[in-house]
Image (cartoon, rainbow, N blue to C red):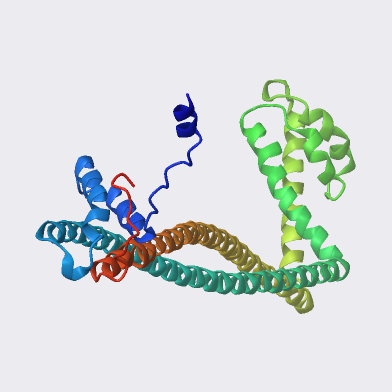
Amino acid sequence: MKRAASSNNAPAAKKDKVNPAFVDIQDALKKAEHLPANCRLMLAAMVPGSFANARAERSEEQLAVMQWVEDALKHEQAKLSFDCDAVAAKLAEVEGSKLAQLEEVQKAEGAIVAKKECLSSKKMALAEASIAMTLTKKMLVEKQEEQKTCDAPFLAMKKEQEALAHAFVEHFKVPLEAGEVLHYQELQPFLSNLELEESFMVSVPSSCMKSKEDRGSFDHVVLQALEQALLDRASQIKDAVSNRSPESEMRETGILKVEEQLAVDRTAQEKCQQELAFAQKDLEQAAAVLKDIEQVAANIGVELKASLKQSDKIRFIQEGFEQGPLASFRTCKDGVTASGLCATAGA
């Protein structure tokens, strides 16, 4: 029992210390995915024993293991270098795309500026055309008022001429030839200006209200007198209208010219409105294009940020590998760290 107690109270066996350089190499070997898992573990386990001796004292077996380890590490170094180059190439490609897209954004922004200037110009042109048409309308109203004041008798005569010509055909001649009742209500406004005997004038309503079958001889005489009176009045009006004064003709000509100018101004305004609408739509389309280009640029920016992060990550891993396991291997290979500090086979 004493022996057992003595044995239980004995200090714990002193653990072998681990060389950190060996640990770096072993960890790198365990991650060498190009090798089978059992080969990785085997190489990692042989590291302490292979590097324990000084360079001049190493056996052929130790040198062979070191060569295997070196080949594995160089393969990892080449893989990291390849990955780093691939990420760098991708980064350069994304940066190039970003630069090209920024140029597209600048072009689109320049197009927006130009189209805004064009839109402003079209607005100004429409404003000027509208002002011109307003002034022409005002001038036309003034000339029409002048004509209305100065040529009131002539205008009344001309108006009567047009109305009488229509009434004579539609309300007297056509129904008379058809044997129908004449349209007395439509003819009545013209009767006051006719030179017709009073007896006939009194009989006109009655004679007009009769059809051909109901008309007597006197009715025929009345209607013949009415027809002649209407024709005489039309002739009088024609003579009066034909003998208008030169001043009245000048006023008429002036109105026609202003009406022609108003038509030109209206056409110009409509054209300006169409051009303004087109310029507005063109600007809206350009703005939509710019928005799409900016969205693409933003997406490229996100991709660029991710590529930069990936590049930094792979470079960090590469530098860690070169300054860690690879540097440790070269140091151990040269025998600089070979000492009594060994890693256990399973470390």
Residue 210 location, quadrant: top right
**Pick the front one: 6 or 275:** 6
Numbered disc total? 0
In screen coordinates, is 161 left or right of 23?
right
Q: Residue at x 72, y 61 (%)?
A: 238
Residue found at the far front of this picture: 2
- The answer to whether 241 appears left or right of 98 in the picture is right
Q: Report if residue 153 is visible in the image.
A: yes
Q: Position of residue 101 (x, y in %)?
A: 44, 66
Along the viewing direction, whichever of 219 and 332 lies nearer the viewer = 332
In the picture, measured across the screen, residue 221 lies left or right of residue 65, that is right
Location of residue 214 with respect to 252 vertically, above or below? above
Residue 128 on image: x %, y %: 70, 74
Q: In the rendered image, is residue 89 in sight?
A: no
Residue in front for this viewpoint, 137 or 61: 61
Q: Residue 100: x and y, percent?
A: 41, 70
Q: Quadrant of residue 99?
A: bottom left
Please report the residue visible at 83 percent of the width from the left and 68 percent of the height from the top.
151
Q: Is residue 93 above or below residue 182?
A: below
Residue at the farthest top position: 213
Residue 135, x across and y down, in percent: 77, 73
At a point 42% along the width and 43% down the height, the residue shown is 13
Which of these two is toward me, 206 or 271? 271
- Residue 48's quadrant in the figure? bottom left
